[in-house]
Amino acid sequence: MVPAEHYFSATPGGEIVYKTISVELAGRHLDLTTANGIFSPERVDSGTQVLLANAPAPPPGGNLLDLGCGWGPIALTLAMESPHATVWAVDVNRRAIELVRRNAEALGLSNVNAVTPDDVPAELAFMTIWSNPPIRVGKNELHAMLLRWLPRLEPGTDAWLVVQRNLGSDSLHRWLQAELPDDFAVNRAATNKGYRVLRARRRSGTGMTQEIPLV
């Protein structure tokens, strides 16, 4: 188990050690590359499995966001299921970003941009956001991250978040409903294996009217 401060750091310590794992994403059996110093390098973690099993088909086009991408299971799934969309795989961990790029290239996916948060153009809005957010990084960091990115949804679109129940999914649900702009509605879309899938929907007829803080 990699400590949160390790996989959530920009440059994990220790010499990088690559490994190949076999996974199933978007109905395909794949051999992909992971490494030490990132989140869940041995497999697709349970929370991400629950999210992928319960989120609807992603939009066919536009900009799609995987927030906290790790080695890329969500971003790669989005890219394979929506080949005409542009998938932004965002993480502070540069090792994770390098792995997403490596895996996307190995799969021939040219529609994946794996970048740090500050490398996403400020004017971009997203047709969907999927995330297994880093709950263990701490409440203040988590809240700042979600308030930075969720308001960048296009009107009439959704964010899908998976959170373990015993790590505060219900309190996060209440916090999101209270703190997101008034044009958002948050509900529990699914419960499975001790996880909640939360859906944050931005109602139609709204837009990115408020300044997004660069935190």
Image (cartoon, rainbow, N blue to C red):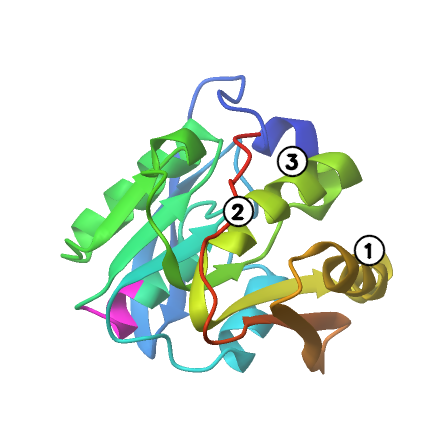
- Can you give x and y, in whole percent of width and height, for residue 182 in the image? 66, 64
Tag 1: residue type?
Answer: Leu
Q: Pointer 2: what residue? A: 210
Q: Which of marks 3 and 2 is in front?
A: 2
Q: Pointer 3: what residue? A: 2
The magenta segment is: 79-83
**Rendered view: 86 above or below 189:** above
Q: Give the left or right position of residue 208, taking residue 100 as reference.
A: right
Question: Dot 2, how many residues are within 10 Å of its Cα: few (below 14), some (14-19), or many (20+)?
Answer: few
Mark pair 1, 3: CA separation: 17 Å
Instruction: Residue 106: tell me if it is visible.
Output: yes
Q: Is the magenta stretch mostly helix, strand or loop?
A: helix
- Can you give x and y, in whole percent of width and height, for residue 68 in the image? 51, 46
Disc 1 is placed on an element classified as helix
- Can you give x and y, in whole percent of width and height, for residue 118 in the image? 41, 30
Q: Give the left or right position of residue 134, taking residue 151 as reference.
A: right
Looking at marks 2 and 1 on the same chain, the residue that comes earlier in the sequence is marked by 1
* Circles 2 and 1: CB atoms closer than 8 Å: no
Dividing the picture into quadrants, the one containing residue 189 is: bottom right
Disc 3 is placed on an element classified as loop
Q: Which residue is drawn at 17% across and 68% down?
A: 84
Looking at marks 1 and 3 on the same chain, the residue that comes earlier in the sequence is marked by 3
Q: Which residue is drawn at 43% across and 60% down?
A: 74
